[in-house]
Structures are given as structure tokens and as C-alpha cells.
Image (spheres, coloured by chain):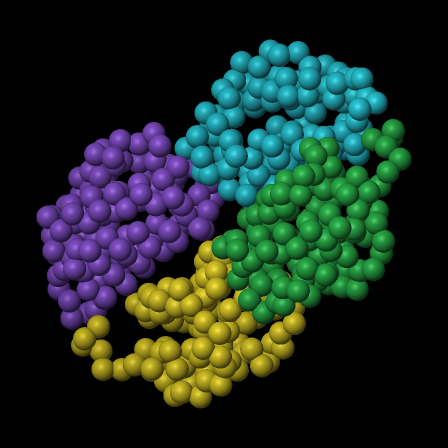
Chain colours: A yellow, B green, C cyan, D purple
Amino acid sequence: MAADTKSLYERLGGADVVASIANDIVDIHMANPVLNPRFKNSNPDELKILVRDFFAMGTGGPNNYKGKDMLSAHSGMNINETEMISTIDDVMVALDKNGVGQEEKNEVLAILYSLKNDILHV
Amino acid sequence: MAADTKSLYERLGGADVVASIANDIVDIHMANPVLNPRFKNSNPDELKILVRDFFAMGTGGPNNYKGKDMLSAHSGMNINETEMISTIDDVMVALDKNGVGQEEKNEVLAILYSLKNDILHV
Amino acid sequence: MAADTKSLYERLGGADVVASIANDIVDIHMANPVLNPRFKNSNPDELKILVRDFFAMGTGGPNNYKGKDMLSAHSGMNINETEMISTIDDVMVALDKNGVGQEEKNEVLAILYSLKNDILHV
Amino acid sequence: MAADTKSLYERLGGADVVASIANDIVDIHMANPVLNPRFKNSNPDELKILVRDFFAMGTGGPNNYKGKDMLSAHSGMNINETEMISTIDDVMVALDKNGVGQEEKNEVLAILYSLKNDILHV
């Protein structure tokens, strides 16, 4: 990785691709029976903006994220491992759909996994 | 059961015992690591009143329940089977603590189980 | 319940009905995606006999059960609450299919629930 | 990653470190209450050899693995997401304990995640 001088955000394809990935993640989550009960009271359009901005920030892109930190965002939800794996699966499908390569997928996986303690059972 | 002319509410011991059971259920839930993330934003005193009145109503006692129906109350929470079993376990401990007999415990279990489709994954 | 002088086994309908319930339980389990990985190496006919004899024994019928005790039978399987609830659901469907009444269903539920500590996470 | 000419096996530290990681993984699993019911009938020493050889093979080291393929090894176990996440966590602890760096940890995570469909619910 040391040889890469581009951020993950750039290697994903920048603003347009990240926005497209975020839109796809939300759409796939909302069609996923393991996850969609969680989104019953969510506005998909607002959610897409939050996901886009969080994804950009977390991959070394611009920092416009206006949402809560991960721990506050998930506090009281008691999210379990089945939901977390299903979420990661959906993200991987969205990355595939947007032509992201294996190495970048692995980096996104590692980032998602690193957020685990602020998401699961909190 | 046909020979019983008393309601389950009366056989549990009426208002005082049901209020005590409800208090114990909420206290036990809040100390239960499987469940307590769900109660982070709950007021225990308000919850005890809701549980007491729901329990009274569901066992043939007075109907003063002011809360939501079960489906509305749990909608968006994506409650899973581990949480449901842990909830039932806590209720059984609270019944034991209040001297409830095996037959009445079985009836409460059957009532809780009958609520399953309005609670799990909704 | 005090007024009942008949065993649960008799009230379920005796040997023929219990055998039919056991056959249905195994068939329903094997078609249930939550449970069927567990039965990949099982012989359905042998399993039906074990379930029939265990069910008979546990409901006050004849004791011909040749299987392991519940703890030994499930040791090392790490069965979880989702599987247990799904198992109970299947049993309830089998009871409905065989015309079993609500009170007897509740008694079977209580018996299954009482086995929990010998089945879950052992 | 393109700049690395060494295999992950070499970058982990080769045979001695991989053997140490494998030993630690098995010890940590066997002390983990989420996982240890699965190992009730396992021989830890045999398991350590299998894990060592599988790990070596999967990271580009020598191929001496004598065990079953992943799908056959887990068939009938109905392993769930909680167990899988707990397994990955244990592996990460074992990697930390053996001084493995963040990039190599991410690569191991990606390999483990890629095995998911041969392990979960099969």
C-alpha cells in the first residue's frame, strides 16, 4: 500500500462513483429483509447523503459529513452480527456494481470491520 | 383449565403482585447485557407502568394500558430471537421472584409466545 | 389442569397421533432453511422414531426412547436461539396439522421451553 | 500491494510465526464461550496442525494441508454470523499477539471474509 500515493477515495473513482456507491448501498439495504426493518422510519434521500459523506470522509475524500459519530448513531439499536455481516455484504455488492477492484474492496472491508465496536450491541 | 373460574390476573395475585412483577421485569431487563442497549433512552418508571398495565390487560385484569400495540411498539427495532428468549427468561425469573406457580408461568409463556409475530424482525 | 385426569399423551390422541406429529415435525424441519443444515447427515426415518419416542415419553406416554438425553444429544452443536424458536415454530405447525387444541399446544410449548438449558449453546 | 514481491506468508514471518499464530488461534477459540461448544470433541493438537497448514496454504506458503475443504469441513454445522465474527476477532487477537502489522491483518481479514460462503449456514 505504501507505493500508492492516491487516496482510497480517488482510487474508488472520486465524488461521482462514491455518490453512486452510496445510493446503491441504501437501495440494496432497503430491499434486504435482514436489514430493512431498521429503515422503516428513514428517509432514503437523507440517508444516501449521510452514507455518501461518511464514505467520502472515511476513504480520504472531502469531509462534509453532518451525521452523528458511529457510536451515537447506533446507540440503543442493539445491532447484531447477522445484521453487520449483511450490511458488509450489501456494501460489497454495491462496490462490485460500481466496478471497484479487489484491493479497494478489501480496504473498504477493513474500514468497515474497524468500526465494529462502535456499531455492534451498543 | 376449564375448571378455573379465576382469571390469570387473579391467580397471579392481582394488582399488587402484577405491579411487583412488572417492576422486577424492567429492573432485570435493564441489568441484562443482551437487552439493555435497547433501554438506553427509556425512562424506567414510565416503562414499569407500561409493562404493568400491559401485563394486567393481557392476563384478564383491568385495561388501563396507554401504550402502543405490540407491532407499532416494536416496529423498526428488528428484534431477534436471542433477545426474545432473553426477555422471556427475565419474565420467568420475575415470576419466580414473586412466587408464581408453574401452571401460571406456563400460561404467561404461552401469551408471550403468541405475541411473537408482532415483535420479532418488525 | 387439576381437573384433567388424562395424560397429555392421551389428550394429544395417543400413539397414532403422536407418531403422525413426529413424522410431520421431522419433515417440516428438513424443509426449513434455518434448520436443515443440521440434518444433512441424519436419516429421516431413524429421526422420526427418535422424535416419536421422545415425544411420547415426555408427554406421559410409553417410555421406549432409545436416544441420548437432551444434553448429550446437543453437546458440541452450539445451537442458538434462532434455531430453537424455529424448532418450536415447526412443532406448533405439526400440532396444528394434527388437530391439537390450544391448551395442549401450550403444554407442549412449556415442555419444549423447559428443555432449553440442555439444548442451547451446549 | 503491487510493490510487494513477498507472499503474505513471508510477510507474516514464515513457518515459525504462522505456527505460533495457529497455536494461539486454537487456544483463544477454546477459551471463547461463543465458540468453545464447537470444540468439545476436538483434539487441540490435531486442530493446531490443521489450522497451521491451512493458514500456510492460504497465505502463499507451503501446501501441506491434509484437512477437508472448507465447505466439507463445516457442512452440517449451521455456523452463524455471531460465530464467524467471533472467529475473526480471535484471529485478529492472535495476529496482534504475534506482532503482525495492520496491512497484513487486513489481508488476512479479506481472506477469511472470502471463505464466508463455504462456512456460514452450510
Q: Position of residue A13 (x, y in %)?
A: 38, 81
Residue at 30% from the left image edge and 51% from the top image edge: D90
Residue C81, x across and y down, in percent:
55, 43
Tell which of B79 and A63 is nearer to you: B79
Residue D39 placement, left or right of C14: left
Residue at 35% in and 32% down: D40
Task: State the image quarter where residue A14 is shown.
Answer: bottom left
Q: Nearer the viewer, residue C49 or C55?
A: C55
Whether residue D114 is visible: no
Please say if C9 is above or below D110.
above
> In which quadrant of the rendered view does residue A58 lie?
bottom left
User: Which residue corresponds to the image point at 38% horizontal and 37% vertical from the top-left?
Assistant: D38
- Tell me residue A119's x, y (percent): 45, 66
Between B24 and B107, the one nearer to me in the picture: B24
Q: In the visual, does C27 lie left or right of D85?
A: right
> Where C84 sits versus A43, above or below?
above
Q: Position of residue C63 (x, y in %)?
A: 62, 12
**Picture quarter containing residue A106?**
bottom left
Q: Quadrant of the C terminus of chain C?
A: top left
